[in-house]
Image (cartoon, helix red, strand yellow):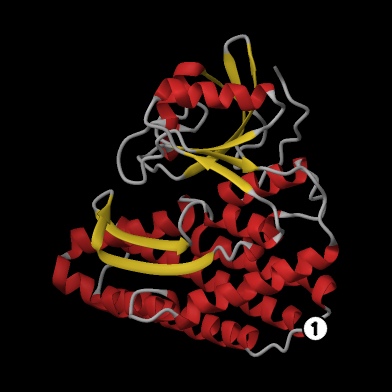
Amino acid sequence: MTLDFNHIQAAHCENGVTTSLLKHNGVKQITEPLAFGIGAGIFFTYIPFLKINNGPVIAFRTLPGLIFNRTCKALDISVVRKKFFSREAAEKYLNDELAKGNPVGCQVGVYYLPYFPKEYRFHFNAHNIIVFGNEDGNYLVSDPVMEGTNTLSAYELERVRFAKGALAPRGQLYYPKENRPVTDEQIKRGIISGIKKGVQNMLQIPGPIAGISGIKFTANRIKKWRDKLGPKDAGLYLAQLVRMQEEIGTGGGGFRYIYGAFLQEAHPYTKQDGLLNIAQDFTAAGDLWREAAVHAAGIYKGRLGSQQDYNTMGDYLLEVAEVEKKAFTALKNIKWQ
């Protein structure tokens, strides 16, 4: 069975799945920037005591699943989300939903996706795809970060749905429960609630490791890595930062560009002219994140490596923190109507 489903390429997997599923279910206004902003996906945290792939956990977005859940909740759309202990039950549930005509989002591991280039395969279990049909024993897959659709055998799909390790998906699938349009007023309310949540995430979480405080905390830690860890491990930690920023989803720079686009798209709904100027701040923050990534790659590759180079890397992040603090403070001070 093949559903009438339109593949939409996106910069980030969960944004793309959210956009595609909601558009398929009647939300014609939705775009990737709107999904990311309404879902309050923008975030930062550095957790030095947790390790993934031998490096500290560094995240530039909220927990997997929250963008989809928050966007649907803001638009008054119920969500079905399930995990499974049984592989057979997971396959049967998916097949039943496809038979009903429902495309289904799935959380999967990246490492065993056969259509991913080998250099992009690593053990990361929070990738998102859409299964929209089966044909000749194969499942039809819309992966938003790919240009076109792909197919997976039943074995291949089961393997990635039940990948092991951190954030193991356990066959997790999800989809909107309702198929109906939403009004522009609902979009507006979702935009405002999403911005308020983003402000809370970046300015108001207590402690040193999240939001703007987390960026500053990371900056100061980076300046100490060379002496504390030694050049080799310090370089690996910076490589982890770059990978989490630029290769897992769209990361630091890319998410800031998307958030700037969200504020631009929010303007016609909210009539708040200040959003356009604040959008430029997020574009500037994205540029700084990208410059920092290039500098970090230079240290990892051995082209740079002095203590001054680590100080410069930390200073990049301190500058990012000031730009983003200014932007989120401006959003916090908007008087919504």
Corner quadrant of residue 241: bottom left
Relative to 283, say whether 26 is above or below. Answer: above
Residue at disc 1, secondary structure:
loop
Relative to 135, say whether 179 is above or below. Answer: below
Corner quadrant of residue 37: bottom right
Q: Residues within 10 Å of mark 1 (few under 14, many from 20)?
A: few
Corner quadrant of residue 295: bottom left
Residue 76 visible to an observer of this rendering: yes
* Residue 304 rendering spot, x and y as whole percentages: 31, 66
* Residue 188 rendering spot, x and y as whole percentages: 77, 69
Residue located at (63% from left, 88% from top): 330
- In the drawing, does residue 88 fall left or right of residue 99? left
- In the drawing, does residue 267 fall left or right of residue 121? right
Q: Mark 1 points at which residue?
A: 273
- In the drawing, does residue 34 fall left or right of residue 325? right
* Residue 51 rendering spot, x and y as whole percentages: 25, 55
Residue located farthest toward the top when viewing the structure as drawn: 136
Relative to 51, say whether 263 is above or below. Answer: below
- Report the number of numbered marks: 1
Relative to 296, say whether 115 is above or below. Answer: above
Residue located at (36% from left, 40% from top): 168
Question: Which residue occupies the foreground of this view, 59 or 1?
Answer: 1
Question: Which residue occupies the foreground of this view, 314 or 187?
Answer: 187
Residue located at (20% from left, 71% from top): 226
Q: Which amino acid does label 1 sit on?
A: Asp
